[in-house]
Amino acid sequence: MGRRDWTPGRGSDTKRPASRAACPNEGTPYAPKEPKKGLSGACAPRRLNPLVEVFRYDRPFKRSCNQEDPWPFRQLSPDELHAAAAELDRCLYNHEEWLNGLFGTLICRLRPDERDLAPDAHQKCRLGQWYYSPLGTATALVDQPGFAELGAEHERMHQCAAEMLHASESGEIVPLDYYQRFMNALKRMRMEIFTLRRDIEDTLYALDPLTSVPGRIGLLNKLREQQSLVERGVQPCCVAIMDLDNFKSVNDVYGHAAGDKVLVIFAHHIAQGLRPYDRIFRYGGEEFLVVLPDTNLEEGFDILERLRQELGKLPLEVGAGVPLHVTASFGIA
């Protein structure tokens, strides 16, 4: 299969994807440099029309450039994400059990559990044991948005619970402000848990089920984000489409299972070879789209040429006895 020029849509309003930045400022849109000379061949990255001729959108971009990453868990495998989601569900169940016991103690004037009165009560409950365990699934979420806030609100909730238990144990009526502080901390903690759980679900939903890289679900959001930044002249951005050469013959000769294995190997190799802020999406079939923020055409060309050469040298074990080699073509703009 030869290299094909790629134009995802045609319209009257032309926009260009832009790259990541802290805050956009008005300025002159980025102008690509002249093509780099010296590389040729059917598989070498070919320069398409400027982005202004490639990406067109019917709706305006509405997300802020400094909004949280829509896929905050991309470095985790699907198995790790499923395990974290299941653990969060168990923590929610255990938390509800603890909460029922707390209200029962307060309403019936029972003797409080000493663990709930301890300064480190937030570390002794089931949720706290999961949160602070150095070996559990929580360690995979430490760097994720909202995880620190979850721990802070959980600790604050236990402090408020201890205040109410101390008041009840001394024979006093629990002050209204004690209860209100507890309920506010409880609501904020639950919100952090539900947000974390929703982010995991959104990440799993956006992943391509075969290759585990993001699919087309989140592609337009990312491109619109880049488009907004380029329009403000914040920094350049390169977008490339990759197509596996003669991929149909791989399926025809070695079977679709072998073809799927090739796609997985290629997707993982590209993802590992990109910079932390670069993105790869499975566009469809054997086509992948690569977004290179903060990158001009010269730099993007070098990155993709390196990947192209590496992919062509990959030994692919597909059960044929002899390693298979598959090449890829790139179009960059």
Image (spheres, grey):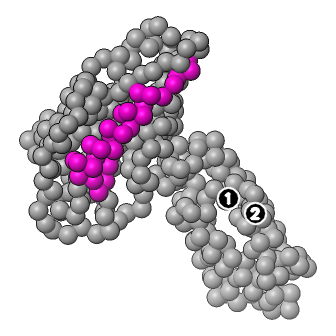
**Left/right of residue 289 with respect to residue 275 in the rendered view:** left
Which comes before the other along the chain, label 1 or label 2?
Answer: 2
Mark 2 residue element: loop
Which numbered circle lies on residue 79? none
Neighbor class of circle 2 (other Cα within 10 Å; few <14, some 14-19, many 20+) is few
Q: Does 313 lie within the magenta span?
A: yes
Q: Nearer the viewer, residue 212 or 87?
A: 212
Quadrant in which residue 276 is drawn? bottom left
Q: Label 2 belongs to which residue? A: 133
Q: Nearer the viewer, residue 313 or 86?
A: 313
Q: Nearer the viewer, residue 118 or 66?
A: 66
Q: Label 1 belongs to which residue? A: 138
Q: What's under tag 1, amino acid-wise?
A: Ala
Extent of the magenta region: 292-318
Relative to 213, residue 41 above or below: above
Residue 130, image x and y in percent?
74, 61
Q: What's under tag 2, amino acid-wise?
A: Ser
Q: Does 4 lie within the magenta span?
A: no
* Quarter containing the N terminus: top left
